[in-house]
Image (tube, rainbow, N blue to C red):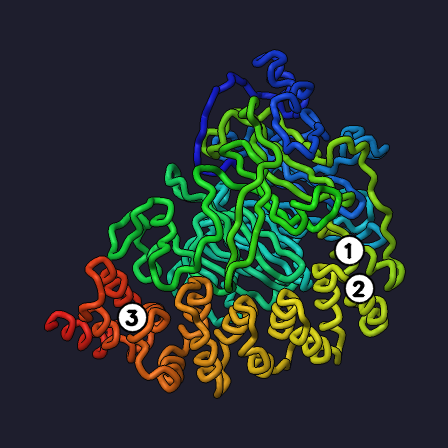
Amino acid sequence: MKCSRVFLLVMAPFAVQAANPGAIVASAAAATGNQREPANAVAGLEVHEALQVELFAAEPLVLNPSNIDIDHKGRIWVAEIVNYRGHQGKRPEGDRIIILEDKDGNGKVDGEGKVFYQEKDFFSPHGVTVFATPDGKNTRVIVSVGDKVLILTDEDGDDKADKVETLFSGIGGTQHDHGIHQVMFGPDGKLYFNFGDAGQQVKDKDGKPIIDLAGNEVKNDRKPYQNGMLFRCNLDGSQFETLGWNFRNTWMNTVDSFGNSWHSDNDDDGSRAVRINFVMEFGNYGYKDEITGAGWNDRRLNQEVEVPLRHWRINDPGVVPTLLITGAGSPTGITMYEATLLPKEFHGQMIHCDAGPNVVRAYSVKKVGAGYTATMLPIVTGTKDQWFRPSDVKVAPDGSLIIADWYDPGVGGHGAADLMRGRLFRVTPKGHVGYKVPKLDFSTAESCVEALKSPVPSARYIAWTQLHKMGAAAEPALKKLWASDAPNLRARALWLLGKIEGKGQDYVNAAIKDSDADIRITGIRLARQLPGMDVVAVISSLVKDADPGVRRELLVALRHSKAANAAALWAELAVQYDGKDRWYLEALGLASDLNADACFAAYLAKVSDPTKSAAGHDILWRTRSKAILPLLVKIINDKATTVNQRPRYLRAFDFHPKSPEKDAALAALLGG
């Protein structure tokens, strides 16, 4: 699990020979005495002033938790790793998926837990996600492990896997934290997952290459994808989409109720450029050169002065902006807090683990134009105990947070120094007592709608699938949720209402006329997922929407459009660019890249000379039409263009393919 950066503090001596975890833990006590004992775990942590942190579970119940999920019953499912990299074979019986439960509600795990799955060839699971059924039978658990995404199924409700199937295969990065990561359930009923730059490719269960909906093989070969990638697909693996690419090590993805994807990305060690991304679908995120594959530190025109910005090629046309650079670190688990137990400042925000600086943070996100800004708010920090290595965080059914702690003197995967410990912590408001899990009922549409309100994705999965099966019979109950005052709950209802057979157009129409921009955005995304939907008509109806974020989503929806009026719609959206909003500019680029000549011609029909304005300059810099090349020459040769500005426009030439037009423009530039 441990991310590639190494902050090695103290290499505690250990000798792991025993196959059973109890023996491993016993050697820990002998090596370190009481200093690292679970009884002292909370004392080394600093917590936000309005919150409290309590130890929920510790060794020997859990060792090296790489990832967790929480089911609708409030049980914690843990992906546990001992056989990692240089330590492979230290647990001969294999790594495991375990289930931990607080049966009496006192805020502490009871008993020894259950082993859901453990086999000798099961090494280094980096993701675990629970997909249960209302009766508790036929529970499917999706595990990201080695070169595969597996489905482990409990067919008789005894909390043990009876069947193992492959969902995806052929993924690189076995025994590497830059490989495959956790699969998430989205509000649209789809799966979201990602891998880092060691992942290389995804193949189907039979080992055949996957061709995504854009017609591209999902492979690191710059045709067009490279490095880390983010994906979306149906529950059975069909309708596969590549949502983003050119990340370094995007550890984990999270999706909010509106369908926004967010995740962290790990920089090259020492670059102080760990980042948080809002994922603008289909975007390039700048880790390596889009055209040549060159590394970020290879010298290039117009490169950024500051290393953290240079690392992600912020100055290159075609790179989606970074939401927030958090500095040096080793980012791991991330989740959306769509609950109400914690104070209001955490509502609707990302909660994120950064194992390097020993911290779990919230990010306060605000809209700015077509994009966002964010600030950091620490929740729990290993101020005194720098072995605190948070690997994951999830929201429990009661709204509390469960934090998995890998607990180690370092975070570097190649230098993992402790195999003997692991902790789970629980964060609640100060003074809160106990762990009370709401009882959920999935027998009626009304009770399923109540369950759909849960902050736990596994509970929402059961509710979503039950309501989706009910179809039109669930509509009255869902319409009540659609009328809610809570935008995120309205969005959850919308996804289901729009997928009732014969009702899609009605609910898309209602959504795109809504006063809430986030609901209009959700309506656009819903329309894109519905078979036979006239997405271009949706775009046309919103093309002059006042909200830049809505127009951003229209541009994303235009990217693969073959409609006759697609270029004209793009031009209408382009003339609304304000010359300042980089998020909007990159959305324009995404939408035009596959139809650049037609889009730019339509834009010229509206703006006769784009060299006369800052907005026009930006569009010329980003758009990749052959007709733009002589206009770039005009800008570069213009006396009003300063020496410092010229490299920006010269760099734009690198993203135009070789052509007679490009040769002529470069010759004219040399002549000038």
Going by the numbered disc 2, the residue's amino acid type is Leu
Q: Residue furthest left?
A: 671
**Does residue 216 sit above or below 385 in this rendering?**
below
Q: At 72% from the left edge and 68% from the top edge, which residue is drawn?
A: 494
Residue 119, position in %: x, y? 65, 38
Give the SS element for disc 1.
loop
Q: Are marks 3 and 1 in contact (CB under 8 Å)?
A: no
Q: Are marks 1 and 2 in contact (CB under 8 Å)?
A: yes
Image depth: mark 2 or mark 3 in front: 2
Q: Earlier in the sequence, mark 1 or mark 2?
A: 1
Identify which residue, 649 or 218, lies in the foreground. 649
Q: At 51% from the left edge and 41% from the top edge, which residue is drawn?
A: 331
Residue placed under numbered mark 2 in the picture: 481
Q: Residue furthest right?
A: 443
Residue placed under numbered mark 1 in the picture: 453
Give the label on residue 229, or none: none
Tell me if mark 3 has few (under 14), some (14-19) or many (20+) residues whose alpha carbon lies within 10 angstroms of its own.
some
Give the label on residue 656, or none: 3
Q: At 68% from the left edge and 48% from the top edge, which residue is drawn?
A: 347
Q: At 64% from the left edge and 39% from the top edge, which residue is drawn?
A: 79
Mark-to-mark CA distance, 1 and 2: 9 Å
Identify which residue, 35 or 431, lies in the foreground. 431
**Does residue 402 sit above or below 518 in this rendering?**
above
Give the SS element for disc 3.
loop
Quadrant in which the C terminus appears = bottom left
Mark-to-mark CA distance, 3 and 1: 48 Å
Q: Earlier in the sequence, mark 3 or mark 1?
A: 1
Q: Earlier in the sequence, mark 2 or mark 3?
A: 2
